[in-house]
Amino acid sequence: MPQPKSSSHIRFAAVGDLHVQSGSAGELRELFAHAADKADALLLCGDLTDYGTAEEAGILARELSAVSIPVVAVLGNHDFEAGTPELVTAALAHAGVRVLDGSICEIEGVGIAGVKGFGGGFGRGSLGAWGEPAIKLFVQEALNEAMKLESALAKLRTRRRIALLHYAPVVGTVQGEPAEIFPFLGSSRLEEPLLRYPMDAVFHGHAHRGTFEARTINDVPVYNVARPLLQRTRPDTPPFFLYELPRAPVEEQAPAAA
């Protein structure tokens, strides 16, 4: 069992949009080594592969197999491209990664709820379920992901809570992207469950040219940890965000629901 990096805090290394390709073997080992050295757990925010193939997933799984700290992930839209996201999930699970999809886990007293999320737009620009069946299906997918997040959050019993997504739940972290593609980068419907439960932080990826940090309506920090964004804005540091939370006293830690 790896030793805690701090006696007073638990540290998470968060990054998304790794986009592993067939020629990516060896490219992420240094990043993962840095993360394992600095953090108590690694959070991966989707688009772990580029085309969602079994080959790409296998390469990533082998890169992660040497990581000594817990790894928690959600899938992204790229992980669905080949039509076999279950193969990506299976390869990662074989490497010991906990892949969340409307589910939860707990790491050292911190509860984590994870979903991929979906698009649909933000605020008054949100797409409504009106008109053609295809539009209604699109909106229903966003609603389904929001309900999965709601269900997962309801199961958490820890005082400290983190949400792990791929799509953005707030417009603030997609600022910097072309406004025309905002509806495809996230949805305010994902923010709604986050307002009903106490949260410490939210992590997502997807918006490569977005903004690193924003806030929900009730002031919960939301971090866009897409690797291209971190590489561009923090060129002198390893491309992950190190986030820490105070450790809860043992008597306050309650196990997460199954």
Image (tube, rainbow, N blue to C red):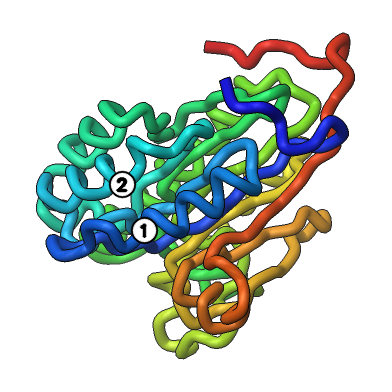
Q: Which residue is mark 1?
A: 28
Instruction: Judge left or right: residue 29 versus residue 253.
Output: left
Q: What SS does tag 1 mark?
A: loop
Q: Nearer the viewer, residue 199 or 208?
A: 208
Residue 39 versus residue 151 in the image, above or below: below
Instruction: Judge left or right: residue 61 versus residue 111.
Output: left
Q: Which residue is mark 2?
A: 63
Q: Quadrant of residue 170?
A: bottom right
Q: Residue at x 79, y 15 (%)?
A: 253
Q: What SS does tag 2 mark?
A: helix
Q: Residue at x 18, y 43 (%)?
A: 58
Identity, as a three-letter code, of the amino acid under mark 2: Glu
Q: Is residue 78 at all visible to an observer of this figure?
A: no
The answer to whether the residues at label 1 and label 2 have Cβ atoms under 8 Å apart is yes
Image coordinates of residue 107 in percent, x first then y, are 62, 26
How many numbered dots are placed on residues in this image?
Answer: 2
Identity, as a three-letter code, of the amino acid under mark 1: Leu
Q: Residue at x 60, y 33 (%)?
A: 112
Q: Quadrant of residue 174?
A: bottom right
Image coordinates of residue 59 in percent, x first then y, are 20, 49
The residue carrying pointer 1 sits among few (fewer than 14), some (14 to 19) or many (20 or more) residues within 10 Å by Cα, namely: some
Label located before the other in sequence (1 or 2): 1
